[in-house]
Image: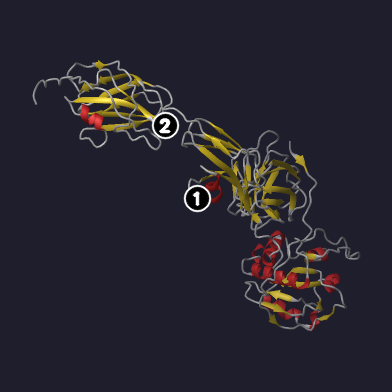
């Protein structure tokens, strides 16, 4: 069930130490319209729009009869920044905020989205970052505004809009200005946003409309970036439209997750957000009718390195629309090196396979399983040492080991910051010696046609697979691989039949079936040791056959661990004659 949260808007700056940003180039073009700050500390920057062209604004703010000025004016395309008043002096731009603030005029209009181009915005971000660094201004956009001209009761520090100071006659920088982007970009320039942070807008890689219909909107104030997505809601039940923000985090650790959206009266008051993190999934109901145009914190959660964590928004909430805009994953505490896993257990599955298991380790992005046949090799990672990256699991079965051998082992838990080994007690495990497979029985060969024979047998126990061998003489069959007419085919452990095609007609074939595992193998021979293509009528069979009791590997490639034992037994031919051709050649 969704948990309704008390919404908390970010009003405080990051506590990470700031790095010095690049100082933007400015043209000194002094205005006479200024006076002393009277010792008041600069704690705010006020953002304006000129409501006219750059050149006209600069000219007017330098005119003594204007009674107005600003510290800086940025040209429409960002190619120029003019400084009209020194930072240490009081410019005349925001009435009762003048003594405590620096004023920045952006050439353009509060009511026009086209003001905020990728020409002017980067220069604004550069300038604000430099001023915040130089004067210690907190990189925050406070909420609220003055309630009346007479009271002048707005008293918030940080990055402020002119409309907040003088709402009775000013609206700049306007509804199209993206305060969230300003905060993010300034922090990026200051280095006060961790390099591990990830902000995903609805147009960025990492965002996906997983299901349903999500339309694109641009008109609402308080959006992050150029647009946002929205979907109609459905009452109760499962969501029919789901959006997702999935970051690729460079390091595991604790991340504060915040969402950004433009508020409105038709928004859902319980938008169904969920955060999937290292410890599971947490659900939230967010009132999108309030706190628009700012970061709304959902909480702080542990995340693994990579893209296993994500935020989703469903439309299974109250009427009438939900908005999918941006999500910020802010690194709070990077994960330390993964601690050593505990609870290490090893058990022999059979003579060749060991299953290893262990407890999960906090923030581990994955685990290595290390084995060796003595303690020294395990420590030095030499000689018999082997290692496998098992992934983000807590059990792994190692197959194909040597029966009867002793294996020392350990588990390495790791993440981007490093890792630690966990050691079992006892430190080693001895595999059982194991047995070779039993021989298959009931060997039968059936002539299918002039060029095809079907071989069948009854499966025994303990085999990893079979080899079916044929040759045109007993000696070639006994010699195995390399003999002139010897052929064989490898088959799976549950295969009990094989149709051999493409044979020569009117030809005798001697045959056998070899069952094998890593311990060794055993040949089984049919009672009638050979079969001839065509000649005895359709459906002719030989057999049933008997299983040979002697182990050997003549002519069979069975892989590491197979025993090479001598072939013993006599092979007697069985001949099937070729049918005569009837009619014309």
Element under disc 2:
loop
554 over 193 or under it: above or below: above
395 on left or right of 150: left
- Depth order, front residue of 538/225: 538
Sequence-wise first label, 2 or 1: 1
- Badge 2: residue crowd in 10 Å (few <14, some 14–19, many ≥20): many
Q: CA distance from mark 2 to mark 1?
A: 26 Å
* Residue 462 appears in view: yes
The residue wearing badge 1 is 382
- Badge 1: residue crowd in 10 Å (few <14, some 14–19, many ≥20): few
Q: Residue at x 80, y 58 (%)?
A: 143
* x, y percent for residue 42: 82, 72
Its colouring scheme is secondary structure
- Depth order, front residue of 553/266: 553
* Residue 51 appears in view: no
- The quarter holding residue 20 reads bottom right
User: As drawn, which residue projects farthest toward the right?
Assistant: 151
80 over 422 or under it: above or below: below
573 on left or right of 407: left
39 over 513 or under it: above or below: below
Locate the N terminus and report the quarter of the image it occupies: top right
- The quarter holding residue 453 reads top left
User: Which mark, by number, is residue 519?
Assistant: 2
């Amino acid at each position: 069930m969704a948990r309704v949260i008390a919404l908390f808007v970010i009003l405080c700056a990051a506590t990470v130490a700031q790095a010095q940003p690049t100082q933007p180039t400015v043209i000194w073009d002094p205005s006479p319209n200024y006076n002393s700050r009277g010792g008041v500390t600069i704690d705010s920057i006020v953002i304006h729009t000129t409501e006219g062209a750059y050149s006209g604004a600069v000219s007017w703010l330098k005119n003594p009869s204007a009674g107005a000025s600003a510290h800086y004016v940025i040209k429409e395309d960002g190619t120029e920044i003019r400084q009209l008043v020194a930072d240490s002096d009081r410019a005349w731009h925001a009435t009762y905020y003048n003594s405590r603030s620096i004023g920045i005029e952006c050439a353009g209009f509060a009511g026009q989205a086209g003001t905020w181009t990728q020409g002017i915005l980067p220069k604004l971000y550069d300038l604000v970052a430099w001023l915040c660094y130089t004067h210690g201004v907190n990189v925050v956009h406070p909420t609220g505004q003055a309630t009346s001209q007479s009271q002048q009761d707005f008293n918030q520090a940080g990055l402020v809009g002119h409309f907040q100071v003088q709402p009775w006659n000013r609206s700049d920088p306007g509804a199209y200005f993206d305060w969230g982007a300003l905060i993010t970009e300034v922090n990026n320039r200051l280095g006060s946003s961790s390099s591990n942070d990830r902000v995903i807008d609805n147009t960025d890689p990492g965002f996906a409309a997983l299901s349903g219909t999500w339309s694109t909107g641009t008109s609402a104030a308080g959006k992050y970036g150029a647009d946002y997505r929205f979907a109609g809601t459905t009452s109760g039940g499962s969501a029919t439209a789901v959006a997702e923000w999935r970051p690729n985090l460079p390091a595991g650790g604790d991340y504060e997750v915040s969402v950004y959206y433009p508020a409105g009266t038709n928004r859902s008051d319980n938008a169904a957000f969920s955060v999937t993190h290292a410890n599971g999934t947490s659900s939230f109901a967010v009132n999108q009718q309030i706190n628009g145009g700012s970061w709304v914190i959902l909480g702080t959660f542990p995340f693994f390195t990579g893209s296993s964590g994500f935020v989703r928004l469903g439309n299974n909430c109250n009427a009438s629309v939900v908005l999918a805009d941006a999500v910020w994953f802010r690194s709070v505490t990077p994960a330390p090196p993964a601690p050593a896993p505990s609870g290490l257990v090893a058990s022999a599955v059979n003579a060749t396979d060991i299953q290893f298991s262990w407890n999960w380790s906090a923030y581990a992005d994955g685990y290595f399983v290390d084995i060796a046949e003595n303690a020294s090799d395990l420590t030095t990672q030499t000689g018999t040492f082997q290692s496998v990256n098992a992934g983000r699991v807590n059990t792994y079965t190692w197959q194909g080991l040597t029966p009867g051998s002793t294996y020392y082992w350990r588990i390495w838990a790791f993440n981007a910051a490093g890792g630690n080994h966990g050691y079992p007690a006892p430190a080693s495990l001895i595999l059982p010696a194991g047995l070779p497979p039993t021989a298959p029985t009931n060997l039968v060969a059936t002539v299918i046609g002039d060029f095809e024979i079907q071989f069948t047998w009854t499966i025994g126990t303990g085999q990893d697979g079979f080899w079916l061998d044929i040759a045109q003489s007993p000696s070639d069959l006994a010699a195995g691989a390399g003999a002139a007419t010897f052929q064989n085919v490898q088959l799976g452990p549950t295969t009990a039949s094989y149709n051999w095609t493409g044979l020569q007609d009117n030809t005798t074939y001697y045959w056998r079936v070899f069952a094998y595992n890593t311990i060794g193998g055993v040949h089984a021979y049919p009672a009638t040791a050979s079969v001839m293509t065509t000649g005895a009528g359709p459906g002719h069979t030989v057999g049933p056959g008997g299983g040979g009791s002697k182990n050997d590997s003549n002519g069979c490639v069975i892989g590491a661990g197979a025993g090479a034992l001598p072939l013993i037994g006599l092979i007697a031919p069985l001949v099937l004659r070729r049918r005569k051709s009837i009619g014309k050649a």
